[in-house]
Amino acid sequence: MKEKIDQFIRYLEIENDASRHTLRAYKRDLEAFSEYIRGKTGDIEMIDVRGFVAQQIKDGLSRTTASRRLASVRSFLNFLCREGFIKYNPAKLVSTPKTEKKLPQFLSVDDVFSLIEKPDGIGFIHARDKAILELLYSSGLRVSEIAELNADDLNTKEGLVKVRGKGKKERILPIGSKAIGAIKSYMVEKMLLKKKNRAMFINRSGTRLSDRGVRRIVVKYSRLIGIYGQIGPHTLRHTFASHLLQAGADLRVIQELLGHSSLSTTQKYTHIDITHLMDVYDKAHPLSNDEKEK
């Protein structure tokens, strides 16, 4: 089974041009499946796949993660079918677990401004961290997108950034003036560091900053301003989208900016906006509290 998984991963890398993050996720999911079925390949049945998904949930994984692992297994077994290793894909008949729809968390305007202003020192690290926070909020980038940025992807003169999203799809996004200023300051510090690397964001040793490194930066400054709980780069992505919607931006525009392939993915932000409007109404409308008291 290990050999078949390796072949599939190579296929995804070469034919689909899958990202490092995607390849790692597929490999992790399929290794878990292989362990569950004890490495057999030719006689995989629907009950094996169904049992695997049920075991994932029983072991404490979320239904969302279990659903993703089922999708990985489906793709893998499709590959084995095409290559003639198995006759049919038993995963096609396995239902995807129903998942709870969670509304994305986002920061208030005051909180996000406090977060962005927190790296206020001098030197390479403060300049880099501020540029990352500004860019995350200014353009709503995914953590993988910001980690994979190259220096020539940014056009500070025109205020644009070229992003390679999921499936290597490119999109051009605008950058706010505050983010442009922070990026320019960082580029000066980066030049002084004299570390040649085409990567936009690097660490002190001059190598590309990883997804994990970007997450650590967001968590670090969040803690410094007193924000705890589950927070990371994706929180700033949600904040970017939510604030745009509250300001009256069209949902289709937000979809394009976020790089969502489906509008239904973007529509979850409408629920946040309705909740926000109700809160504003309750606090501001002169009859709101009177009606509740009756």
Image (tube, rainbow, N blue to C red):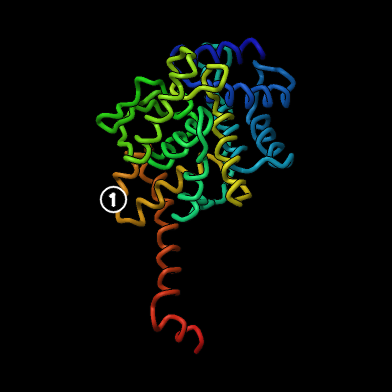
Residue positioned 60% across, 46% down in the render: 224
Tell me where residue 189 appears, x and y as whole percent: 45, 24
Observer-nearest of 207 and 22: 207
Observer-nearest of 96 and 230: 230
Residue linked to disc 1: 250
**The furthest residue to the front:** 122
Q: Quadrant of residue 37?
A: top right
**The furthest residue to the left:** 158
Up-down: is 79 above or below 286?
A: above
How many labels were placed on the picture?
1
Circle 1 residues within 10 Å: few <14, some 14–19, many ≥20: few
Looking at the rendered structure, the secondary structure element under dot 1 is: loop
Residue positioned 66% across, 19% down in the render: 43
Observer-nearest of 224 and 267: 224
Quarter of the figure with the N terminus: top right
Residue positioned 43% across, 63% down in the render: 276
Amino acid type for the residue under numbered disc 1:
Asp
Up-down: is 268 above or below 191?
A: below
Q: Quadrant of residue 281?
A: bottom left
Tell me where residue 218 appears, x and y as whole percent: 55, 39
Q: Is residue 51 left or right of residue 274?
A: right
Up-down: is 214 above or below 196?
A: below
Residue positioned 41% across, 36% down in the render: 135
Tell me where residue 129 appears, x and y as whole percent: 50, 34
Q: Is residue 51 left or right of residue 11?
A: right
